[in-house]
Image: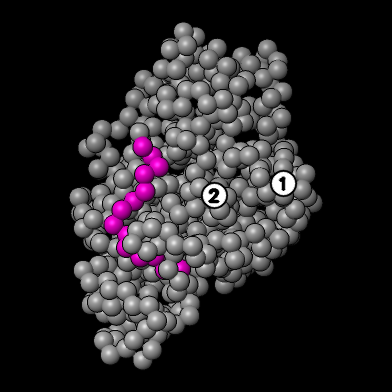
């Protein structure tokens, strides 16, 4: 037989739940896997020797803030260099369509700390107009999600109240537009504006629309407003009443979540994803109570211009910082508009500036808002981190996702090493799961859960997304001090049958597709 690409002599792990490695060759024609077998008598225009290497399906990152990078940013290949071939758009419900250009610009400002200044011309008045940005312009595949922030903003702006029946009807129509455009889930960030003021009724009603298209519900839950346990139980209630599978973003298994996961078994179909680092990363507003965030960026600025508002902000944020600091946690500057304090934690920076913490908080917001980005590091011991990784990676309802953020000079290392770390630490060092199970959690499971057709497994007739890596040397190198170091150990990455990473280096190919779900 003759193939376009022939991967010879690799140990194939196909990405399915019950996968077992087997020595086989993989033949590819066009963008599809044509054969997985002993193909020693076959030839190909491109032959790749995978002797001693693992051949697996391309990994799928269901939570990554990569939109701008994929379109040509300086960190375009950070995830591909780990073997990630498919990425979901608009995580945390961040999105800017379908909106007028003025609305898109206004909503973008609320995400500027994560994505950077808007350098595109935002004229995306339908979901397809936004998705057209990526057609022929990305090295990785992308899959749309319904961005709840844009849906709610289109219906009611920054209003900090429950939606009316008429506004709910508008939102239902916008959810349908996105699902018809190929989205496979309703995606929310319930600690972010304007989604934070949605009530449970709104979330159930919109989830019913997504469920009609065989979609799922995925959310950054209300940690800030109601706390972890109540936020999880709200998610279970949504799953139960909307009759929709639900998924919780960036969590990990500890005693409280282990109990909640057990509780969910009797209520709904619930999964979660984790990047398994002892730190989060998001904007400055994360430290501020939700009511003080009302009104979007202009609302925060208005509070910063009144004595009452300034006192409320400085008191609340300083109290949070002190409490976290006493517990060993640190809020570290990942990026600032002025370039000051990067790499320092806020409490230590205030001391270095010889300022009371309340005064320093206001100095930071006056100078940096809305562009300040923080890494929120917990004070876990190495032993606690290892136990967290073991419990999390081994849980049957868990999949791997990075929550990568690429704007700012001192980024969280998860965006550059999450998938490699799962195998280096979780598989090799801690033996939390076998390699085959880890690959299921990075490929087959996310594809199955997020309704991604014909991807996530190496199967004849399915799309030819693949990663070839050395199971002994595949590892993350990104650290807290050097977060932008790329992973090592990946030899080749193919997207739709084309090589995008060769000998550990990016090629010039941009074969990524806009995937349309099976709604």
Q: Earlier in the sequence, mark 2 or mark 1?
A: 2
Around disc 1, counting alpha carbons within 10 Å, would you say few (fewer than 14), some (14 to 19), or many (20 or more)?
Answer: many
Image quadrant in which the N terminus is located: bottom left
- 422, 70: nearer the viewer: 70
- Looking at the image, can residue 242 be seen? no
- 374, 200: nearer the viewer: 374
Tell me if residue 487 is in the magenta stretch. yes
Residue 480: x and y in percent read 35, 35
Q: Which residues are magenta?
A: 482-495
Residue 338: x and y in percent read 56, 25
- Mark 2 or 1, closer to the camera: 2
Q: Is residue 276 above or below residue 472?
A: above
Residue at 50% x, 18% y is 318
Tell me if residue 4 is in the magenta stretch. no
Q: Which residue is the site of mark 2?
A: 73
In which quarter of the view is residue 515 placed?
A: bottom right
Local SS, label 1:
helix
Q: Quick check: 50 left or right of 57?
A: left
Q: Which residue is the site of mark 1?
A: 104
Q: Is residue 362 above or below residue 282?
A: above
């Amino acid at each position: 037989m003759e193939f376009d690409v022939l991967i010879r002599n690799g140990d194939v792990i196909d990405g399915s739940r019950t996968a077992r490695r087997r020595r086989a060759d993989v033949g590819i024609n066009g963008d599809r896997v044509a054969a997985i077998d002993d193909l020693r008598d076959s030839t190909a225009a491109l032959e790749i020797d995978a002797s001693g290497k693992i051949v697996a399906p391309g990994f799928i990152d269901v939570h990554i803030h990569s939109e701008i990078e994929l379109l040509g940013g300086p960190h375009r290949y950070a995830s591909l260099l780990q073997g990630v071939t498919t990425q979901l758009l608009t995580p945390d419900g961040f999105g800017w369509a379908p909106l007028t250009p003025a609305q898109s610009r206004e909503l973008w400002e609320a995400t500027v700390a994560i994505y950077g200044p808007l350098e595109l011309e935002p004229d995306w008045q339908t979901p397809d107009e936004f998705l057209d940005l990526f057609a022929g312009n990305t090295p990785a595949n992308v899959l749309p999600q319904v961005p709840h922030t844009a849906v709610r903003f289109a219906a009611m702006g920054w209003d900090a109240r429950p939606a009316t029946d008429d506004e709910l009807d508008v939102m239902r129509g916008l959810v349908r537009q996105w699902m018809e455009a190929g989205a496979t889930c309703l995606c929310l960030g319930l600690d972010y504006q304007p989604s934070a003021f949605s009530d449970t009724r709104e979330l159930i009603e919109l989830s019913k629309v997504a469920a009609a298209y065989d979609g799922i519900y995925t959310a950054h839950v209300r940690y800030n407003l109601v706390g972890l346990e109540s936020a999880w139980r709200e998610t279970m209630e949504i799953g139960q009443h909307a009759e929709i599978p639900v998924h919780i973003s960036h969590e990990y298994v500890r005693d409280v979540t282990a109990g909640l996961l057990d509780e969910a078994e009797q209520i709904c179909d619930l999964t979660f994803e984790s990047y398994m680092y002892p730190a989060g990363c998001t904007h400055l507003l994360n430290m501020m109570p939700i009511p003080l965030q009302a009104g979007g960026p202009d609302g925060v600025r208005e509070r910063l211009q009144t004595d009452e508002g300034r006192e409320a902000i400085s008191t609340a944020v300083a109290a949070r910082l002190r409490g976290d600091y006493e517990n060993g946690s640190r809020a570290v500057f990942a990026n600032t508009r002025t370039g000051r304090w990067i790499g320092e934690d806020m409490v230590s920076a205030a001391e270095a500036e010889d300022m009371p913490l309340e005064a320093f908080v206001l100095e930071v917001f006056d100078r940096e808002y809305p562009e300040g980005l923080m890494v929120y590091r917990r004070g876990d011991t190495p032993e606690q981190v290892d136990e967290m990784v073991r419990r999390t990676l081994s849980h049957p309802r868990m999949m791997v996702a990075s929550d990568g953020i690429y704007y700012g000079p001192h980024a969280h290392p998860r965006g550059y090493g999450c998938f490699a770390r799962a195998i280096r630490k979780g598989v090799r060092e801690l033996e939390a799961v076998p390699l085959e199970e880890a690959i299921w959690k990075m490929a087959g499971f996310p594809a199955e859960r997020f309704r991604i057709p014909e991807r996530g497994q190496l199967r004849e007739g399915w799309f030819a997304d693949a990663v070839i890596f050395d199971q002994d040397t595949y590892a993350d190198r990104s650290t807290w001090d050097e977060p932008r170091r790329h992973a090592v150990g990946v030899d080749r990455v193919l997207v739709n049958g084309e090589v995008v990473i060769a000998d550990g280096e990016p090629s010039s190919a941009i074969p990524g597709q806009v995937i349309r779900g099976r709604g």
